[in-house]
Structure formats: structure tokens, C-alpha cells
Amino acid sequence: MKDRTDRSLRSRVARVAVAAAVGVCPLAVGGTASAQPAAACGGYVGLTFDDGPQAGNTPALLDALRQNGLRATMFNQGQNAAANPSLVRAQVAAGMWVGNHSYTHPHLTRLGQAQIDSEIARTQQAIAQGGGGTPRLFRPPYGETNTTVRSVAATYGLTQIIWDVDSQDWNGASTDAIVQAAARLTSGQVILMHDWPANTRAAIPRIAQGLAARGLCAGMISPQTGRAVAPA
């Protein structure tokens, strides 16, 4: 009788071990394992960070994102990418996507076509030379755009991405306010944040918790639709 009980116990323990190995959650020892993956996503949102990469900010931001299991799109300024190519590589190594945010962050709608072209082209080059690949997404500084800006971006195969939710981190928003802004995101939407505010970095663990509680995951931004989708 004891031998039979021992074999039954070993069998149940083995089933739990197998369930853990394949990423499902056993409901109870001897019970039925759930077929749901451990990190099921009911939708995706686009986390975006403008103005990097910068030596004093980007490494800490990447650490915070990585530690909380988040991926994001980094809209880099070309001048920063040119000055910090190792940080462009670090962004990619951390699982981030890299986008174009112009070279010097000007008001593009006040510039002529040739100047707009230069801002975009030099940024494409700086990011590619830094190891960030050829960007497919473009965010105009200040979200300011017009027909000429869109047309020039399109000649480089870039899809313009604005945002659905503004975290206001650039305007001194508190950590609580940034977390609350992220809580307004719905599936497919994109939030504007920045590489440099300390309050934004502090908000990341709570943003991750809030998304998980709502069944949302951080996704990539589709160049076809401009919406957040499952990572490719």
C-alpha cells in the first residue's frame, strides 16, 4: 500500500514539473494544468521614448525596461545616435526598436523641403551606422507635421507615428501622473514618453504592473498601420 502511495505521489510531482517546464500553470497537485500561457496578452500597446540615446539616461532606462519585461520603441535624435553609437547598439541588444526623431529636433514645419530631407536622411544614416538598422518609423519633433514632412519621410520608407496618449513627462509630470497616463492606454494605442525624465524611469515598474493587470503587453508599432501589435 505504501509503495503504491509513493508511486502516486511521484507521478503527481512529475506532472507539476512538466507543466512548469512548458510554461503552463498547474491548478493543483494532481489537478488539470491550464492551457493558457504564463504571460497571455489580450492586446498590445506601444511604449515610446523620444530624444535618446544619452549617456546619462539611456542605460538606466534600458535597465528599468528590461527588468520589468517591457519592450519599447526608441525615437532617437540623429545627433545623439551619432555621438553615442554604443548606446544605439545597447537599445537593440535590450530588445528595443529604434525609430527616427530627426537630427537636431527642430520645428520641421518651419523648414524647407531640403532641410527636412537633411534632418531625416542624416538620422537614418546615424542610426544605421550605430547598429540600429534602418528605421521604418518616424516621429516628427513636437508632433508637428504637414504634407511636406510626411512626403519626405515617405521617400525614406518611414511611417509617421504621433501618439494617442501624452504622458506629459516632458512637462514635469509626476511619477503618479505618468502611471495614470499609461493606464488610459487601450489595445493598439501609443504613449509618448521621453528618454531623460527620472520620473519616467521611476514609473516603469508600475506601468508594467498596470498593463499586466489589464491583460496588455508592450508591443511593436506596425509600419503598415501605425498601431501597436504583437512583436514579430
Image (cartoon, helix red, strand yellow):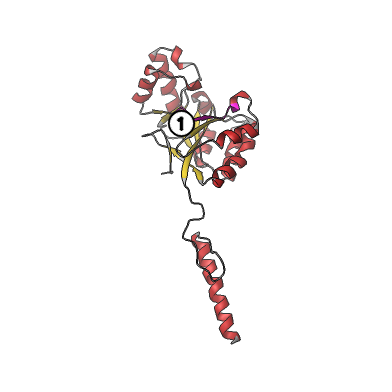
Give the left or right position of residue 161, taking residue 203 as reference: left
Residue 107 drawn at (x, y percent): 48, 16
Task: In this rendered view, identify the residue nearer to me: 89 or 212.
Answer: 212
Residue 148 counted in the magenta span? no
Residue 69 visible in image: no
Give the left or right position of residue 178, taking residue 139 as reference: right
Residue at disc 1, secondary structure: strand
The structure residue drawn at horizontal position 62% and vertical position 29%, both measured from the top left corner, is 197
Residue 181 drawn at (x, y percent): 57, 33
Label 1 CA crowd tier, 10 Å (few <14, some 14–19, many 20+): many
Residue 70 drawn at (x, y percent): 54, 42
Q: Quarter of the image for the C terminus: give it.
A: top left
Residue 140 visible in image: yes
The span shown in magenta is 161-169
Total tally of numbered discs in the picture:
1
The structure residue drawn at horizontal position 46% and vertical position 60%, both measured from the top left corner, is 35
Q: Quarter of the image for the N terminus: give it.
A: bottom right
Q: Please state which amino acid type lies under the numbered disc 1.
A: Gly
From the image, give the main secondary structure of the stretch colored magenta. Answer: loop
Q: Quadrant of residue 17?
A: bottom right
The structure residue drawn at horizontal position 56% and vertical position 46%, both measured from the top left corner, is 213
Q: Is residue 7 above or below residue 81?
A: below
**Which residue is under mark 1?**
99
Residue 116 drawn at (x, y percent): 42, 17
Give the left or right position of residue 106, taking residue 210 as reference: left
